[in-house]
Amino acid sequence: MTDPIFGRLDLSSLSVWRAFQDPSLSELIGAGAAMAVILGALATLALLTWIRLWGPLWRDWLTSVDHKRIGIMYCALALIMLARGVIEGVLMRTQQAFGLHGGFLTPDHFSELFSTHGTIMIFFVAMPFIAGVINYVMPLQIGARDMAFPVMNQISLGLTATGAALVMISLVLGEFSTGGWANYPPYTGADFQPGPGPDYWIWSIVLAGIGTTLSGINFAVTIYKERAPGMHFLRMPIFCWTVICTSIIMIFALPPLTVAALMLAADRYLDFHFFTNDLGGNMMNYVNLFWLFGHPEVYLLVIPAYGVFSEVISTYSGKRIYGYMSMVYATMSIAVLSFCVWLHHFFTMGQSANINAAFGIASMAIAVPTGVKIYNWLATIFRGRVRMTVPMIYATGFFYLFVIGGLTGVMLANPVISYQVHNTLFLVAHFHNVIIPGVLFGLLAGYHYWFPKAFGFRLHEGWGRAAALLWIVGFSFTFLPLYWLGLQGMPRRSASFGDPSFQPMLWLALFGGMLILAALGSLMLQLWVSIRNRVQLAVPLGDPWNGRSLEWSIPSPPPAYNFALLPQVLDRDDFAEAKASGRAYAEPAVYEDIEMPDNTAIGMIVCVCSTLMGLALVFWIWWLAVLSLGVMVVSLIGRTFRTDLSHVIPAAQIAAEHRAWLARVRAAPAVDRLAETHDRNRGRAMPERPFAAGAAE
Amino acid sequence: MSVRQISRILPGALALALTGCTGSGDSFLQPGGPIAAAQRTELFQIFGWTMIAILPVFVLVPLLLWRYRYRNAKARYTPDWDRSAILEVLMWGVPLVIVVVLSAQLYRTTHALDPVQPLASENPPLRVQVVGLDWKWLFLYPDLGIATVNELAFPVETSVALDLTTDTVMQSFLISALAGQIYAMPGMRTRLHILADAPGSFEGENTQFNGTGFPAQRFAARAMSAADFDAWVAQVRADGQPLTEASYALLAESSTGAQAQARLGAEGMAPGVLHFSTVEGDLFHSILHRYMHGNPVPPSAQPGAVGYAPETAEQTR
């Protein structure tokens, strides 16, 4: 029987207590991480109190429904979780480097590490980073004032933060699953892992997954309904096309995961038998559902990164994107094909050769539109004028490393090869090879590219270059050796190994891990140095990179309402054409009142209640689960009775702000691209060529 | 050098480079049988064909970035150029042709190397039943009446027909130097065929994580001449103990091969290896049916479960 008040939570749930009982190195590392979480949280709370930021934090951020602030909070969450994920990765590299017949971590601790590392990196780094960049950029690019559903947007963020919070709490209370990020039953069933570990995984995935589905709906509806006048679908920046594709995947691919996790929960909590060994349960149904989500998921991640690279390469080459229609077709093909290939994650299940061949060919087919995109970017550079800024360094690293990932992807798409390298480090190397140079480099390029838009000052170039180069070199040293080890048959998730010939490559990989740690450090230093030098780096006029799309036509940071007057779009790359034809920075004849949604605490209520509910479910504290769910439901219903949910910004105020900004723009000297990364750059760009009659068709 | 010449030379050069590196020798890159050899060839062929699409990227990226660097006033600058019919055809066409070629090959080899199919051999096939346990492999020889743990011996140039299942969580069975892996799942039977060209010992392993003893779940796949195999069978009959319901219950506990040796009092064998001279009943099928009879299997009767206790399960049954 469990305690009616505390459920199965007791003193031994505390990892610090466990380390006190058994002070081994492995337990001490776990307790150290728990202390870091506790002390980090306490220090943050103390700091907020000390500099009296509680009020501004609550008013301007936590209760905000502004897509820009929500986007920034998503990115902040992702970067914090990235730090934990990278540290865990380096810890695993260290364990394996010393893992010949042993290592310093217990096998249980090691398996917790690879489970949290995968879960965090996919669900709480890549996904929130993507959601953050989309949230910030997409409404600005289509000329909208906010998302279609601003409050739902806040709730999505709240649910994602809940998932991340549960994973962080698992460091302090209880332990996380040891079943990997895919959490396959029956290993994660109640018979084999009766503890709270898999339950942490289930509830963080279910709650964050619901948030992501809602995000997908929000992104799609925003693009369908909120485009500025004249912003036809085929005038949208490529990034917005990638957002459509990604939101389709979010809407259709996340529910199978949520359902699979809930079915696993039914097995574990209610004695169901969906995936148990006995009574007709079948784990392969879980595997099917999981990868029905899991494969579209990787395209969900990489497609927006393609979008970022499209924007970055076009802007820094000073050129239209080559093959716009090809890009649209290619992206949409990838999104559709992504639903037709999931079975390649288990070619070795024992199904017939015909099934394997069909899914193998479908998987390989994705290489065609992906190849087209790479060639399109090269053609965009062709006859351009390229500035090798930080995002372009990421793009260069992406070109080289991503095609290697593509090569090994074509190999893995072949069942004959998959039979050999499935479940080995070859697979680990492959998916890191597409996710780091593809997704992460794309997002970091986007971070550098759009940061000045969000905060009004550029990021320091020098530290940015150092970080980019360290990421590229560090990635190569860490993961390319793993291909070799995988071909030699070293399985993934090995806490130790017995073959001395693996050792040199594992040492190389550890060296690479150190470089990645240095890359992370450089990113943090870059942010610190940039904030300190924000006056020199300021670009308030809004266009530091001679941008091509609408987000660069407004001040940095943009006002809450984004556009003083909704833009009238005449062309693809509308702002570039406007600058060329001289219609940019025009003063509207009339300003109008703007109605904007009010702040609300509902997102925070959902976040706090769902975190408590998740924790209560993990530890079987039934009264708390019911109570927190009840509060959440009542609050959501209660909110629907409120009618006065918006405020009006008067036209006079908008006119004054906008005219003041326009006056500054006109007074400022336009800066050419050679001075792009100099302090002279205040965000007014000189056109790359003199205006010629007829150039703007 | 033509593309065809390159694609012919590259696999060979690559094989040379790869075998030059350090390796354990237990990999399909140094194949010990026809399946692994075919898989290696397939790997190199994919590599060669894919290079047609990849090498241009490697070459063009630095060339383009240098040629069209911002300060190069001599390079042409066409900011509005954004399409070309010829390029479009090439960009879609070349990857498409490569994928079509590789798809035809994939269809052919996926069927040719289907693990369900017996392998061509003049010798009569050998049947072996494989049971994945936490953290060791049990091999049953139904036609010989013997069984082993962590040692799979078989005659060379003989098609070995493996039937696989587990009596715990899912596992994946791989002898890289001979053939690819196949999942082993409770209540289900999968099939795999292996054949070794020459005598030798190849490492086999589980590649699907199944708990703390996972890295120790390795075994030796030993291909030997027919005479040596007969001698080996005789030796197993001589030095093995009977595999009864009781000793199986001990064996099925979560333990590595070395721990199981100690549990069953079989010290003195090769590390992690156990021999059984006789097997009680049709063990493989009783394991398969354990999960398929429509009655619940409580944790106490479920090998690998936290509460596994075969003695109490016996009483409650």
Image (cartoon, coloured by chain):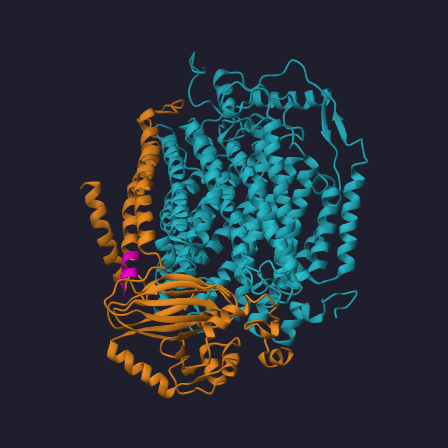
Chain colours: A cyan, B orange
Instruction: Kindly indicate the quadrant of the structure image that contains residue A534.
Output: top right
* Magenta highlight range: B32-39
Height in image: A617 above or below A587?
Answer: below
Q: Predominant secondary structure in magenta?
A: helix
Observer-nearest residue: B206 or A284?
Answer: A284
Q: Position of residue B113 (x, y in %)?
A: 32, 56
Would residue B183 be counted in the magenta stretch? no
Please say whether residue A680 is visible from this viewpoint. no
Q: Quadrant of the C terminus of chain A?
A: top left
Q: How many marks?
A: 0
Observer-nearest residue: B10 or B278?
Answer: B278
Height in image: B75 above or below A353?
Answer: above
Instruction: Kindly indicate the quadrant of the structure image that contains residue A187.
Output: bottom right
Residue at left 40%, top 78%? B148
Height in image: A678 above or below A527?
Answer: above
Q: Is residue A604 left or right of residue A421?
A: right
Q: Position of residue B119 (x, y in %)?
A: 29, 62
Q: Position of residue B85 (x, y in %)?
A: 33, 25
Residue at left 52%, top 61%? A114
Please say whether residue A20 is visible from this viewpoint. yes
Q: Position of residue B79 (x, y in %)?
A: 40, 24
Observer-nearest residue: A355 or A61?
Answer: A355
Observer-nearest residue: A266 or A583?
Answer: A266
Would residue B37 be counted in the magenta stretch? yes
